[in-house]
Image (cartoon, grey):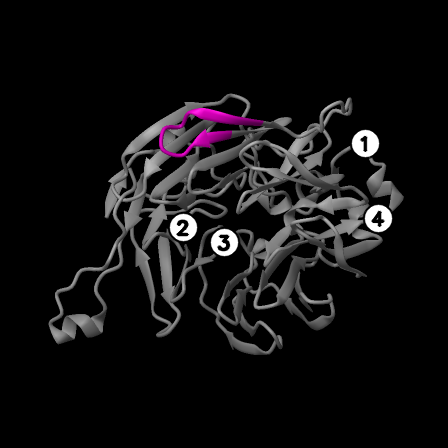
Amino acid sequence: MWWGRPGSRAMPDRGPRNPAPLSVAGRLYVQGNHTLFGIDAYNGTIRWFQQIPTMRRANIPRDGSNMVAAADYLYVAIGDHCIGFDGATGRRELFFRVDAPGTAKQEDWGYLACVGDQLIGSATKPGAAYLGDRGEWYENFRPSEISRVTSHRLFVMDRHGGERVWNYERGAIINSTITIADGVIYFIESRDPKAHDAKSGRLFKEILQDQFLVALDLKTGDLVWEKPYDFSRCQYMTYMSTAADTLVVAGTDKKKQYHLYAFDTKAGDALWQQHTPTKKTHHSGQLSHPAIVGLQLYVNKHTYDLRTGDVLEVTDFNWHGCGITSASLHTMFRRYEFHGMRDLVTGERTEMQGIRSGCWLSLIPAGGVLLAPESSAGCSCAHALQASVAYVPKRSEAAQNSGDQTKPEVPSPQP
């Protein structure tokens, strides 16, 4: 549909697994190397950019992104505060601090999400976030690479005025597990005193002990339910996802065995478990993040029934690079060697030659198109092109055979 800027010069090294691009209301937001871009998603025009020397976050598998987008604002967490940028102009219009008024404790802003008029955040200990400024890959089983970023406080505020709605503070919350759906916020926290009292916000062995799966009412912060559970085999990382009244916790251990745990969201009752060897043993296969489409869970080259855990398919298709899977209703996207996709109905795989995605999440199906901002900077592989690209779906084979000349319907750009 279009290709061009931003190119690789403005991007951070691909290895540290940087925050994913975002797209909403016809806009594409891309976080470069201390540079923030607001782009027209349908023609690639860079509408605005901001240079922010202190804006940086990396090792997202052990943390969470520092930006979230609504239709009107892009929110970005930087240090101890969060800024709301006007989505159309890039103007800095909103400013929120992580600490409550009158609080002397020094904190950084950790988790960030937006639901309706609510801005959800968390407080971490200063310096907890990874920066990745030296091109780290965060691949090896070392505490310096796999320690989770944790929060000691979770809170909700009005996303326009900043009024505080509620705070939750008890254990050490694992940021990469915070999940929101249907008016409930879920997370895993360790209530081990060693985790709660630790001086650092990056923890490994401490947060694998005395773990609880917790559900809070998003509107009030009231406890919905909590369950003690042992996720200590999730050593490399700990993810949580939800769909269709099902919570899925995922992680791998030191031997790269993949572990899945599923729970019913209504009361936290366990549904099923699956434990399998990692099918992709190179290029961060042990860091695969689940993708859910309908009632099917895709991860580690397996397709599972989301509610029962039954294995529906196992594929031996091998791909070269890092990165994780994104999906739309009918198609999955990820890097094979170059940009790749798989039709979920036919199983057909397609690869767009010459250009590759990054080492985390950078293929974004949104607004009727596939957005692939440049994210391969620093790569030494033999890839000819380093540019941002947007793909528009072609007409289906059935439509071509019938002589239907109707073009794919793509929403009009937003002003």
Q: Amino acid at mark 1?
A: Lys
Q: Are marks 4 and 2 in contact (CB under 8 Å)?
A: no
Q: Mark 3 sits on what residue?
A: 324
> In which image quadrant can residue 42 be found?
top left
Marks 3 and 2 sit apart, C-alpha to C-alpha, by: 11 Å
State which tag comes first along the sequence, 4 or 1: 4
Q: Mark 2 sits on what residue?
A: 364
Q: Are marks 1 and 2 in contact (CB under 8 Å)?
A: no
Q: Amino acid at mark 3?
A: Ile
State which tag comes first along the sequence, 3 or 4: 4
Marks 4 and 1 sit apart, C-alpha to C-alpha, by: 15 Å
Q: Are marks 3 and 2 in contact (CB under 8 Å)?
A: no
State which tag comes first along the sequence, 1 or 3: 1
Q: Nearer the viewer, residue 52 or 276?
A: 52
For residue 199, the mark is 1
Q: Is residue 89 highlighted in magenta?
A: yes
The boundaries of the magenta stretch are 84-95
